[in-house]
Image: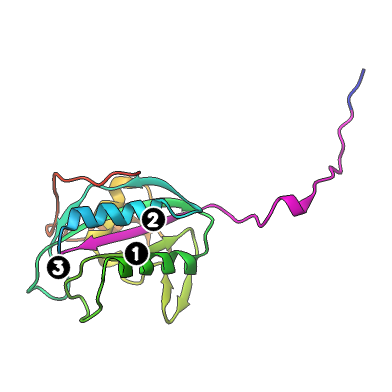
Amino acid sequence: MSMTRDTEPRIDVETLGTMRALRTVVFSLGANLGDTIDTLQGAVDLICETPGAMPVGVSPVYLTTPVGKADQPDFHNLVLVVESTLEPRTLLERGLAIEDSYGRERLEVNGPRVIDVDLIQVGHQRIDEPDLKLPHPRAFERAFVLVPWADVEPDAELEGRGPIADLLSGMDTSGVRKVGQEVTLS
């Protein structure tokens, strides 16, 4: 008995919903006011609980020297990588909502903050809008982003800039020091 294959399967497309590509999303989180480790853990939890975001990995926590404004406490930084079907704008808005939920105030550029959630990269997308730029325009020069990112994805590439390992090879990373405190994925 031979079996024939239906070359025109009848799929009810109404039941499929809107299918979107799964993309690797990189967030950089930092804090230097309040209980920074608890805040970072809470922010990671909130991102991971976002429908459409599946956690891949979180870096160790690093203590980093402030960039642009030296007279403030050092930052605790980490990188979170998720897979997501969400659009970049939705991811940006989620990060901003998390900052708002912790009382983030934007009083001065590069100033101290209770939490900072930066969207670094969403797949291979390039976006240049006034309030959304992907990949993050300064990520390639920030050791506090690249060092933790390399812990999660050693072979990752920053879109338009190349492998993060190559970017790190010519960079001063002395202001980025791993600490013993960890943040976990929920």
Residue 26 image offset from top left, x and y in percent: 38, 57
Total numbered badges shown on the rendered structure: 3
Q: Is residue 6 magenta?
A: yes
Q: Residue at x 68, y 55 (%)?
A: 17
Residue 69 image offset from top left, x and y in percent: 13, 76
Label 3 amino acid? Pro
Q: Which quadrant holds residue 10?
A: top right
**Which of the two residues, 176 or 96, is positioned nearer the viewer here?**
96
Residue 154 makes an appearance in the image: no
First along the sequence among labels 1 and 2: 2
Horizontal arrangement in the rendering, residue 142 relative to residue 157 (left or right): left
- Secondary-structure class at tag 2: helix
**Which of the two residues, 169 or 156, is positioned nearer the viewer here?**
156
Horizontal arrangement in the rendering, residue 153 relative to residue 38 (left or right): right
Q: Is residue 10 magenta?
A: yes
Give residue 47's mark: 2
Residue 154 image offset from top left, x and y in percent: 33, 46
Give residue 32's mark: none
Bounds of the magenta span? 4-32
Q: Quick check: marks 1 and 2 in contact, CB under 8 Å?
A: yes
Label 2 amino acid? Ile
Horizontal arrangement in the rendering, residue 90 relative to residue 149 (left or right): right
Label 1 amino acid? Ile
- Mark 3 and mark 2: Cα distance apart in space: 24 Å
What residue is pinned by disc 3?
A: 66
- Mark 1 and mark 3: Cα distance apart in space: 22 Å
